[in-house]
Amino acid sequence: MASDIKTVGVCGTGVIGASWAGLFLSKGLRVLVSDPAPGAKEKLDAHLKEIWPTLERIGLGPGASLSNYTFVGASLDDHLDKVDFVQENAPERLDLKRGLFATLDAKTRSNVILASSSSGLPSSEFVANCKKNPARVLIGHPFNPPHLMPLVEIVPHPGTQSKYIDQAFQFYQAMGKKPIVVKKETPGFVANRLQAAICNEAYSLVERGIVSAEELDTTVTTGLGLRWSVTGPYMCNILGGGGGKEGFKHLLEHLGPATVVWTKDMDAHTFEWTTENKGKLDESVQDWLGKVDLSAIETERDNVLIDIVKKKQENTALV
């Protein structure tokens, strides 16, 4: 049960791991953190202090405190008997994850869920050396940054037991997240596949000189992205097709022929990852960056995201 989880082990304090640590602390949990990188403790301290005001604005849970975490060093090995849940955030290297999860499996209690933040590697590829209980290993992939974005993709491997999937779901919900269960392992899972598809076309449009990087982003933030933040592609299609039980089918029949033509053109102009093409993208990006304050953008992004998430929580018909 989620209420039984009092201490979380966080492996890795990069952008994702540090954000997870902040979220867990904000919910009143004790957090044990490890990272072998030089200066990791100092960077984590600074990051947590930086994001704490944001977490306070979102709302702190009972007992929440920055003093509730301990940086234990390069490894959690000597502290794994104390944790009730593990969130792993190591680099996307298969050899590293295989060794790490073998250790996590061997040294934690057999019922402790071992969740990986992997953004693309399925857990079936790194559980081979887990001898105690590989059935509690799964992916708990957040959308970045985890302390702000509600989505968590829970991706079990074929041997993950349903009770651990349910427990992970309940735990992430208790952390204020919006978890989904991905029923089959697939490279990149769901969110990153959608993101890759959109970005591939975004890169193609800019590389071909159809729009600038700035205009492309404006198209998303004032159109698709704004709409999709409250109703996703399927619900947009349902409502766009007139609503009701026939809305979705009506829209498919109405826009289907045109979409086929657009898709064929997109396939014909798919972005090629050459040095020249990447240079064209960066040239457009640099033109834009000369006109903006990135620090202000990041601050305002976080403020608006908090407002959107809170507003959606008040409107329960939205997913």
Image: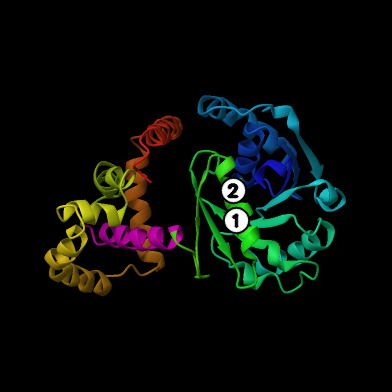
Bounds of the magenta span? 191-209
Q: Which residue is mark 2?
A: 170
Q: Is residue 11 left or right of residue 60?
A: right
x, y (%) of residue 106? 83, 63
State the residue at coordinates (65%, 45%). Answer: 2
Residue 245: x, y in percent?
21, 58
**Which residue lies at the image location 38% right of the left edge and 60% below the top edge?**
194
Q: Is residue 274 above or below residue 142?
A: below
Q: Secondary structure at mark 2?
A: helix
Instruction: Decide if residue 58 is on the left or right side of residue 43.
Output: left
Q: Nearer the viewer, residue 254 or 89?
A: 254
Tell me the residue that label 1 is attached to. Answer: 166
For the residues bearing labels 1 and 2, Cβ distance under 8 angstroms:
yes
State the separation of the CA atoms marked 1 and 2.
6 Å
When the figure is inspected, residue 126 is found, relative to residue 298, above or below; the finding is below
- Prevailing secondary structure class for the magenta stretch in the rendered image: helix
At x 51% / y 70%, what residue is drawn? 184
The 10 Å Cα crowd at callout 1, few under 14, some 14 to 19, many 20 or more, is some
Residue 284 spot, x, y in % from top left: 32, 50
The image position of residue 169, as x and y in percent, is: 57, 52
> Helix, strand, or loop for circle 1?
helix
Q: Nearer the viewer, residue 78 or 219?
A: 78
Q: Is residue 308 left or right of residue 29?
A: left
Q: Quadrant of residue 307?
A: top left
Residue 258 visible in the shown view: yes
Q: Any magenta on residue 125?
A: no
The residue sitting at 66% across, 40% down in the picture is: 21
At label 2, the amino acid type is: Gln
